[in-house]
Image (spheres, rainbow, N blue to C red):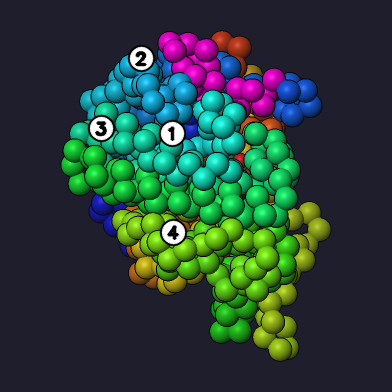
């Protein structure tokens, strides 16, 4: 059985990781522009000032996508490019850029999927407290309104937030990402609550100002778990790990998928949040939870790997130790194809929304061979294995709406700079030349047949 007829085969990127043009045409600064300049933050002191220069080369990238048969492009909008101060005045040149990109995509038969926020908060808003400021949901509302007013006549699909767990966990708690803060638990929970409220306000703005009916979801990540065997005990144990926070540890709480999904789909935080962190929580009102749980059309999930779980004699979940030499990618992430079957299955059972895999892929240390081509056999094998599992999920009646490979291009990999290459297209950062890797052609053939 193939994927369903309307299945969407896409590719994803994010503004700061590919656009470059950090100081052009009236764009305001964002937290990554500043963070990258701080010593010791980014691998080899690199930054996204030029990145892949998609700002100037978008026509080439769209052409490339067309040649590969890619049906949808998930890209994010740089908030500070269209609203340099984050609120108030807009920057027409920035808006024009996205208009041109969208028009070019549509002219080439590629559907735009917009992510509103992929981590690049306008720096002016950071100076006003960023996501800790209780006004931040209103800032995000205004921004989403500008997006709806300018792009929704041609763009019907939206993701509000990309991986809010990283924004808050890495940006404000461990400090590995911009803005590089290490706040205490109380602020941590306030920031998280604000960002979920911001999501709700953005959904409202998109629905209120869109020029056509739009479809909206979120694209979180999360620690995911799959059962060791098909025994009911193992399946239940892995489910428990997926949806229940096990310890009073913020680092565990933030990656638990129910911490973000229960509020947005069920209108309540998981009960462990109250038992483990009751004293640290901000005021959470009924109105807040109504706002946060605005009805959504689909669920986006970024999935790269998961942890194997077995039930012990009492049915309690136990992590299975990975064997020595377990396959892993260049960024040191394990290769666990099972996650593309189990994670959508668990998520669909619990939240009942059609699922887009909004990111999946792997990093490898690719370089052009003597023949000038990029032979990324490992990535082909990775995609093949993962997509077989995804198809198994689709065949077992999990509503899988589409798949976006991460990433279209090698790009600026946040704190890792340019050291990890996730693209199906190689980028020479000196010349900006693009070379489709072998995996891009493998992907092209899958898209063509909607299967193998
Ligand atoms: C993010 C991307 C990132 C990718 C690989 C995801 O967490 O959304 O921006 O490049 O993973 O690390």
Q: Is residue 180 left or right of residue 291?
A: right
- Marks 1/4: CA–CA distance: 26 Å
Q: Position of residue 391 (x, y in %)?
A: 42, 60
User: Is the Cβ of the residue at disc 4 closer than 8 Å to that at disc 3?
Assistant: no
Label 4 C-beta lies within 8 Å of the nearest ligand 1 atom: no
**Residue tagged 3:** 149
- Marks 3/1: CA–CA distance: 16 Å
Q: Is residue 386 left or right of residue 115?
A: right
Q: Earlier in the sequence, mark 4 or mark 2?
A: 2
Closer-to-camera residue (22/128): 128
Q: Earlier in the sequence, mark 1 or mark 2?
A: 1
Q: Earlier in the sequence, mark 4 or mark 3?
A: 3
Q: Main secondary structure of the magenta part?
A: loop
Against 220, residue 138 (above or below) is above
- Marks 4/3: CA–CA distance: 25 Å
Element under disc 4: helix
Q: Position of residue 93 (x, y in %)?
A: 36, 14
Residue 375 visible, this angle: no
**Residue tagged 2:** 93
Q: Residue at x 30, y 27 (%)?
A: 102
């Amino acid at each position: 059985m193939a994927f369903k007829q309307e299945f969407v085969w896409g590719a994803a990127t994010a503004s700061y990781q590919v656009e470059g043009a950090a100081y052009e045409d009236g764009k305001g600064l964002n937290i990554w522009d500043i963070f990258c300049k701080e010593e010791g933050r980014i691998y080899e002191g690199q930054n996204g000032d030029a990145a892949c220069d998609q700002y100037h080369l978008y026509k080439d990238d769209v052409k490339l996508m067309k040649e590969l048969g890619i049906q949808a492009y998930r890209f994010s909008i740089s908030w500070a490019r269209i609203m340099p101060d984050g609120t108030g005045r807009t920057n027409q040149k920035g808006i024009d850029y996205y208009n041109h990109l969208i028009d070019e995509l549509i002219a080439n038969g590629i559907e735009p999927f917009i992510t509103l926020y992929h981590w690049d908060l306008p720096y002016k808003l950071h100076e006003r407290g960023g996501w800790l400021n209780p006004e931040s949901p209103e800032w995000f509302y205004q921004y989403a309104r500008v997006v709806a007013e300018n792009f929704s006549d041609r763009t019907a699909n939206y993701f509000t937030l990309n991986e809010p767990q990283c924004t808050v966990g890495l940006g404000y708690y461990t400090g590995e990402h911009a803005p590089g803060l290490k706040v205490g638990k109380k602020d941590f929970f306030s920031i998280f609550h604000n960002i979920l409220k911001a999501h709700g306000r953005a959904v409202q703005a998109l629905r209120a100002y869109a020029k056509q009916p739009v479809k909206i979801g979120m694209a979180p990540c999360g620690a995911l778990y799959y059962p060791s065997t098909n025994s009911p005990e193992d399946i239940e144990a892995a489910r428990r790990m997926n949806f229940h926070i096990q310890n009073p540890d913020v680092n565990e709480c933030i990656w638990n998928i129910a911490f973000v999904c229960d509020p947005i789909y069920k209108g309540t935080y998981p009960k462990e949040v109250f038992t483990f962190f009751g004293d640290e929580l901000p005021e959470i009102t009924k109105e807040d939870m109504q706002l946060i749980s605005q009805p959504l059309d689909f669920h986006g999930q970024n999935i790269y790997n998961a942890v194997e779980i077995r039930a012990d004699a009492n049915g309690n979940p136990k992590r299975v130790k990975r064997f020595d030499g377990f396959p892993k990618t260049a960024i040191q992430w394990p290769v666990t194809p099972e996650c593309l079957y189990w994670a959508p299955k668990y998520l669909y059972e619990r939240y009942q929304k059609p699922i887009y895999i909004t990111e999946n892929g792997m990093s490898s240390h690719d370089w052009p061979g003597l023949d000038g081509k990029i032979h990324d056999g490992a990535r082909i094998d990775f995609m093949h294995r993962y997509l077989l599992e995804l198809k198994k999920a689709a065949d077992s009646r999990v509503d899988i709406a589409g798949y976006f490979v991460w990433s279209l291009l090698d790009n600026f990999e946040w704190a890792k700079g340019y050291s990890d290459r996730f693209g199906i297209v190689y980028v020479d950062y000196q010349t900006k030349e693009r070379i489709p890797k072998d995996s891009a052609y493998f992907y092209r053939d899958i898209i063509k047949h909607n299967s193998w």
